[in-house]
Amino acid sequence: MKLRLIYPKWEKLAEQTTFNLPPHGPVVMAAALPGDVEVEFIDENVQKVIFDDKPDLIAISVMLTAQVKRGWQVSDRYRKMGKQVIFGGIGTMLHARETLEHADSVFLGEAEGRLDEVINDFRNNNLKKVYNYMLKHPDMKLVEPARRDILTREFYFHKGVQMVDLVHASRGCRFTCYPCCVNFLGGKSFRPRPVDNVVEELETIDNNRLFIVDNSLAQDTQWEKDLFKAMIPLKKKWCSHTIEDKPEVLDLAAQAGAWYVYQAIFDTSDYIKERIKKYHDNGIMVEGTILLGMDNQTEDDILRLIDFLMEIDLDLAEFTVLTPFRHTKAYDDLLRQRRILDTNWDNYNSGKVVFKPMHMKPERLQELYYYAWETFYKNETQEQKMFKLILNVIEKEIKDGIYKKRREDLANVSFGNKIKR
């Protein structure tokens, strides 16, 4: 049986350096398929979708809200050709009812242990309209190493540098952040994979540079420490979302190859300053993630926050505006208050204001978003700062004695003409 797995394209933010990471959801889903299913993967961000009748079944994996409409378009065209289409992924779970209008079937939830049923139903011409496993999380021991063999590696380089591979060590989240939908998608409890299973997958990944995509690793101190200890011999270099700033955790993270972390910066407190200093003291770089447009932010608050960022020695910064994604507290509140102005899902890319802010006009928040990007990168472009990240990881690799062919990175890369040190 031949299955064509498609990852729809979406419009990238103009303010960010454009590069493509190998998608995670599709390779995880592919690992859960029966072994006799032949998978052809198309990432529409780097390839053209092929519309023909060669595959038996079309599967569309949607991660982002900004992908859903394109996914529907692709599906509509295949279905007009008489092909059956099934949707899955985060974006499908957030927009299940709408997606049903464009699909023969939708799969909701996590794939492990469930796709045999789907494929058998398809083979028996009995594909169900909905497979809903949202409240039935699989045993985390069932999570197999992702099927990265379906990727075309050459597409995931940026100016001569191979991009990070994505991997996950846990699912679910015990935190309830206002703009986040992880509780809805993965449950309100922290569900870690067995450390041995994570290490087994890491050993299968040829790429030395990784992005651990977990919502937060800072949820269980002992598991976090056990994971980092087990990773030390692998000599991988990785970035992740938040880790705990306890001295013993940061020390182990550094030993395990922590390259940089994404740190939410939500105020101008000494706590934020000190947290970033702790990372830097352990040789870990920091990319600040800054959310603009929360109800507790006035225009002056945002301007002070932008000034603060210039004082705290961030290595990179990424700015977004509050976006009311489905199944978040933000969406529920703004919908109830009739403050959502735009339901064109293409615009839900975290760079466009689609709601009425509490303390300013939407147009002013959009201006402040652009101002934040321009101000932070006025002296060094984002590509120049990214080049420093690459230099940093190469230095770590040299120190570890696993440099191999990394000199080619420096020979091929051209992030900027003048790099400030």
Image (tube, rainbow, N blue to C red):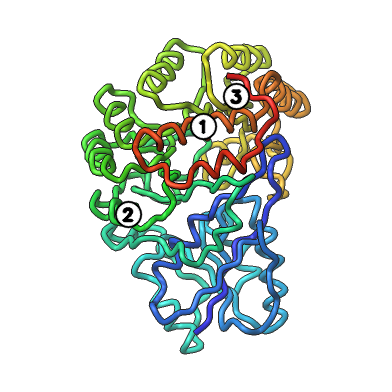
**Relative depth, front residue between 359 and 382:** 382
Query: Which label is found at residue 295?
Result: 3
**Residue 334 coordinates in the image, percent (x, y):** 62, 36
**Relative depth, front residue between 364 and 229:** 229
Q: Which residue is at the far bottom? A: 124
Query: In the image, what residue occupies the spot 76% across and 25% down?
Result: 367
Spatial CA distance of label 3 from label 1 is 39 Å
Say what secondary structure mark 3 lies in. loop
Query: In the image, what residue occupies the spot 66% across and 58% down?
Result: 46
Q: Vertical placement of 127 versus 290: above or below? A: below
Q: Vertical placement of 291 versus 107: above or below? A: above
Mark 1 / mark 2, whichever is N-terminal: 2
Three-letter amino acid code of the residue under disc 1: Leu
Q: Is residue 183 visible?
A: no
Q: Which residue is at the far right? A: 363
Spatial CA distance of label 1 from label 2 is 24 Å
Residue pointed to by mark 2: 203
Looking at the rendered image, the disc whose residue lies closer to the viewer, 2 or 3, is: 2
**Residues packed near mark 2 inside 10 Å, few (<14), some (14 to 19) or many (20 plus):** some
**Residue 324 coordinates in the image, percent (x, y):** 60, 40
Mark 3 in CB contact with mark 1 (< 8 angstroms) = no
